[in-house]
């Protein structure tokens, strides 16, 4: 079977030492070798050699969240998530896939989002925050939104006013656009005052398709969004989701474009943020509440964004109120939501999330994260501590 975009030597570098068994979140819950990285590699090797390609391999290959913890521990330097994605892609290209894979593929193809929402992706802006974002009743842009680039979605520029190219764009993502619109709105209110705008016609970044093996189908979304970025004139993309961030950074060919997270961008513009708040008779008021932080796999382990969110949290609550979880940074446990596992193996996904919640230190009032999928899965796991986006914490401090 053909495996594209992967170092096929990784298939045979694995020495079956079993280091990955101690960190694989799926193996922790199931105890099954086929749902451990070592077992998966043996199965993927069989797929590559044409010995295995029927439905018997589906549960093994598709129960991986692609969290990458196994990569951290592998003494042979193997990158198992890439092998898993290659195996999924090889199987889907021959028409072999689970009903969940098929449903997500078809949903994204029809709606350009993973949620099957047939609605305006910028509805959170037009419906929830017209007055706050500076749009008058006729839909013309006022001074505060001259740089958003929304004219092609029905928000017309004021007559005679030239469109200004923007330097950065906020890539909202599917979940914040449709499930957490208040997070999108609060994030944008901050970012637009730090020089950022929006894409005219953002679509799903393609991450769910790539992780599930539909890289060819994802190519159309990548092309569309890349053209949108080029059209905006921006040289920076600010991603509001860890999955979007990872995909934009590593799966798009964006020459000369910096891809960053919301926390990194805000932290690097903290002086400007404070100046804007001062002009609004506000400030980042220190919150006297103990909090902890969950590292999303795709921004943390995969891309080493560890320090910026922690620095921003300390800016908000103070160093003394920031309590680390038991397993952090590159050793952070997966929330269980990624790689299609939340959709295809929901009970397993929530069991992983419950394991992660056991790492939360006693006495904290909030679990902070920077990924809406982590937020959703950890919240659904039934803990009694609220999980919130880092922007929600910042908004609490500036609205006090």
Image (cartoon, rainbow, N blue to C red):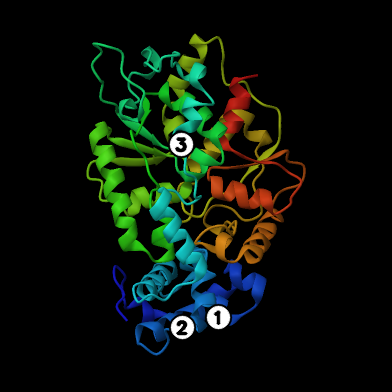
Question: Which label belongs to residue 43?
Answer: 2
Q: CA distance from mark 3 to mark 1?
A: 37 Å
Q: Secondary structure at mark 1?
A: helix
Q: Residue beneath label 3, please?
A: 262
- Residue 282 percent coordinates (x, y): 57, 13
**Is 368 left, or right, of 201 in this rendering?**
right
User: Mark 1: few, some, or many residues within 10 Å (few <14, many ≥20)?
Assistant: many
Which comes before the other along the chain, label 3 or label 2?
2
Within the image, what quadrant is residue 121 found in?
top left
Q: Residue beneath label 1, please?
A: 34
Viewer-side residue, 391 vs 111: 111
**Is 62 left, or right, of 396 in this rendering?**
left
Which comes before the other along the chain, label 3 or label 1?
1
Do the residues under discs 1 and 2 have CB atoms within 8 angstroms?
yes
Closer to viewer: mark 3 or mark 2: 2
Q: CA distance from mark 1 to mark 2?
A: 8 Å
- Residue 219 percent coordinates (x, y): 29, 56
- Residue 53 percent coordinates (x, y): 42, 84
- Residue 357 percent coordinates (x, y): 69, 54
Quadrant the C terminus occupies: top right
Q: Measured along the vertical axis of the image, is residue 352 above or below residue 149? A: below
């Amino acid at each position: 079977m053909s495996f594209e975009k992967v170092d096929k030597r990784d298939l045979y570098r694995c020495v079956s030492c079993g280091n990955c068994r101690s960190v694989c979140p799926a193996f922790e819950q199931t105890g099954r070798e086929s749902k451990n990285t070592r077992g998966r590699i043996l199965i993927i090797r069989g797929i590559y050699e044409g010995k295995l390609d029927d439905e018997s391999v589906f549960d093994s290959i598709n129960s991986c969240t692609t969290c990458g913890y196994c990569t951290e521990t592998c003494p042979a330097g193997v990158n198992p998530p890439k092998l898993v994605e290659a195996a999924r892609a090889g199987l889907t290209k021959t028409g072999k896939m689970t009903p969940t894979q098929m449903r997500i593929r078809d949903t994204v193809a029809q709606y350009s989002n993973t949620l099957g929402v047939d609605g305006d992706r910028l509805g959170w802006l037009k419906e929830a925050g017209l007055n706050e974002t500076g749009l008058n009743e006729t839909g013309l842009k006022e001074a505060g939104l001259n740089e958003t680039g929304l004219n092609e979605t029905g928000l017309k520029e004021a007559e005679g006013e030239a469109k200004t190219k923007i330097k950065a764009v906020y890539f909202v993502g599917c979940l914040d656009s449709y499930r957490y619109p208040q997070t999108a709105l609060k994030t944008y209110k901050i970012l637009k005052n730090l020089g950022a705008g929006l894409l005219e016609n953002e679509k799903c970044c393609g991450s769910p398709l790539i992780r599930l093996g539909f890289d060819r189908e994802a190519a159309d979304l990548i092309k569309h969004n890349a053209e949108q970025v080029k059209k905006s004139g921006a040289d920076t993309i600010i991603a509001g989701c860890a999955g979007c961030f990872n995909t934009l950074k590593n799966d798009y060919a964006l020459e000369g474009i910096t891809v960053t997270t919301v926390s990194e961008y805000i932290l690097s513009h903290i002086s400007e943020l404070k100046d804007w708040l001062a002009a609004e008779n506000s400030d980042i008021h220190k919150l006297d509440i103990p909090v902890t932080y969950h590292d999303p796999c795709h921004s943390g382990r995969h891309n080493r964004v560890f320090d910026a969110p922690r620095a921003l949290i300390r800016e908000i609550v103070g160093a003394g109120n920031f309590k680390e979880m038991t397993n952090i940074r590159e050793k952070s446990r997966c929330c269980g939501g990624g790689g299609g596992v939340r959709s295809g193996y929901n009970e397993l996904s929530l069991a992983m999330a419950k394991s992660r919640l056991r790492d939360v230190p006693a006495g904290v009032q909030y679990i902070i994260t920077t990924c809406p999928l982590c937020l959703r899965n950890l919240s659904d796991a039934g803990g009694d501590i609220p999980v919130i986006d880092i922007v929600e914490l910042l908004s609490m401090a500036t609205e006090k």
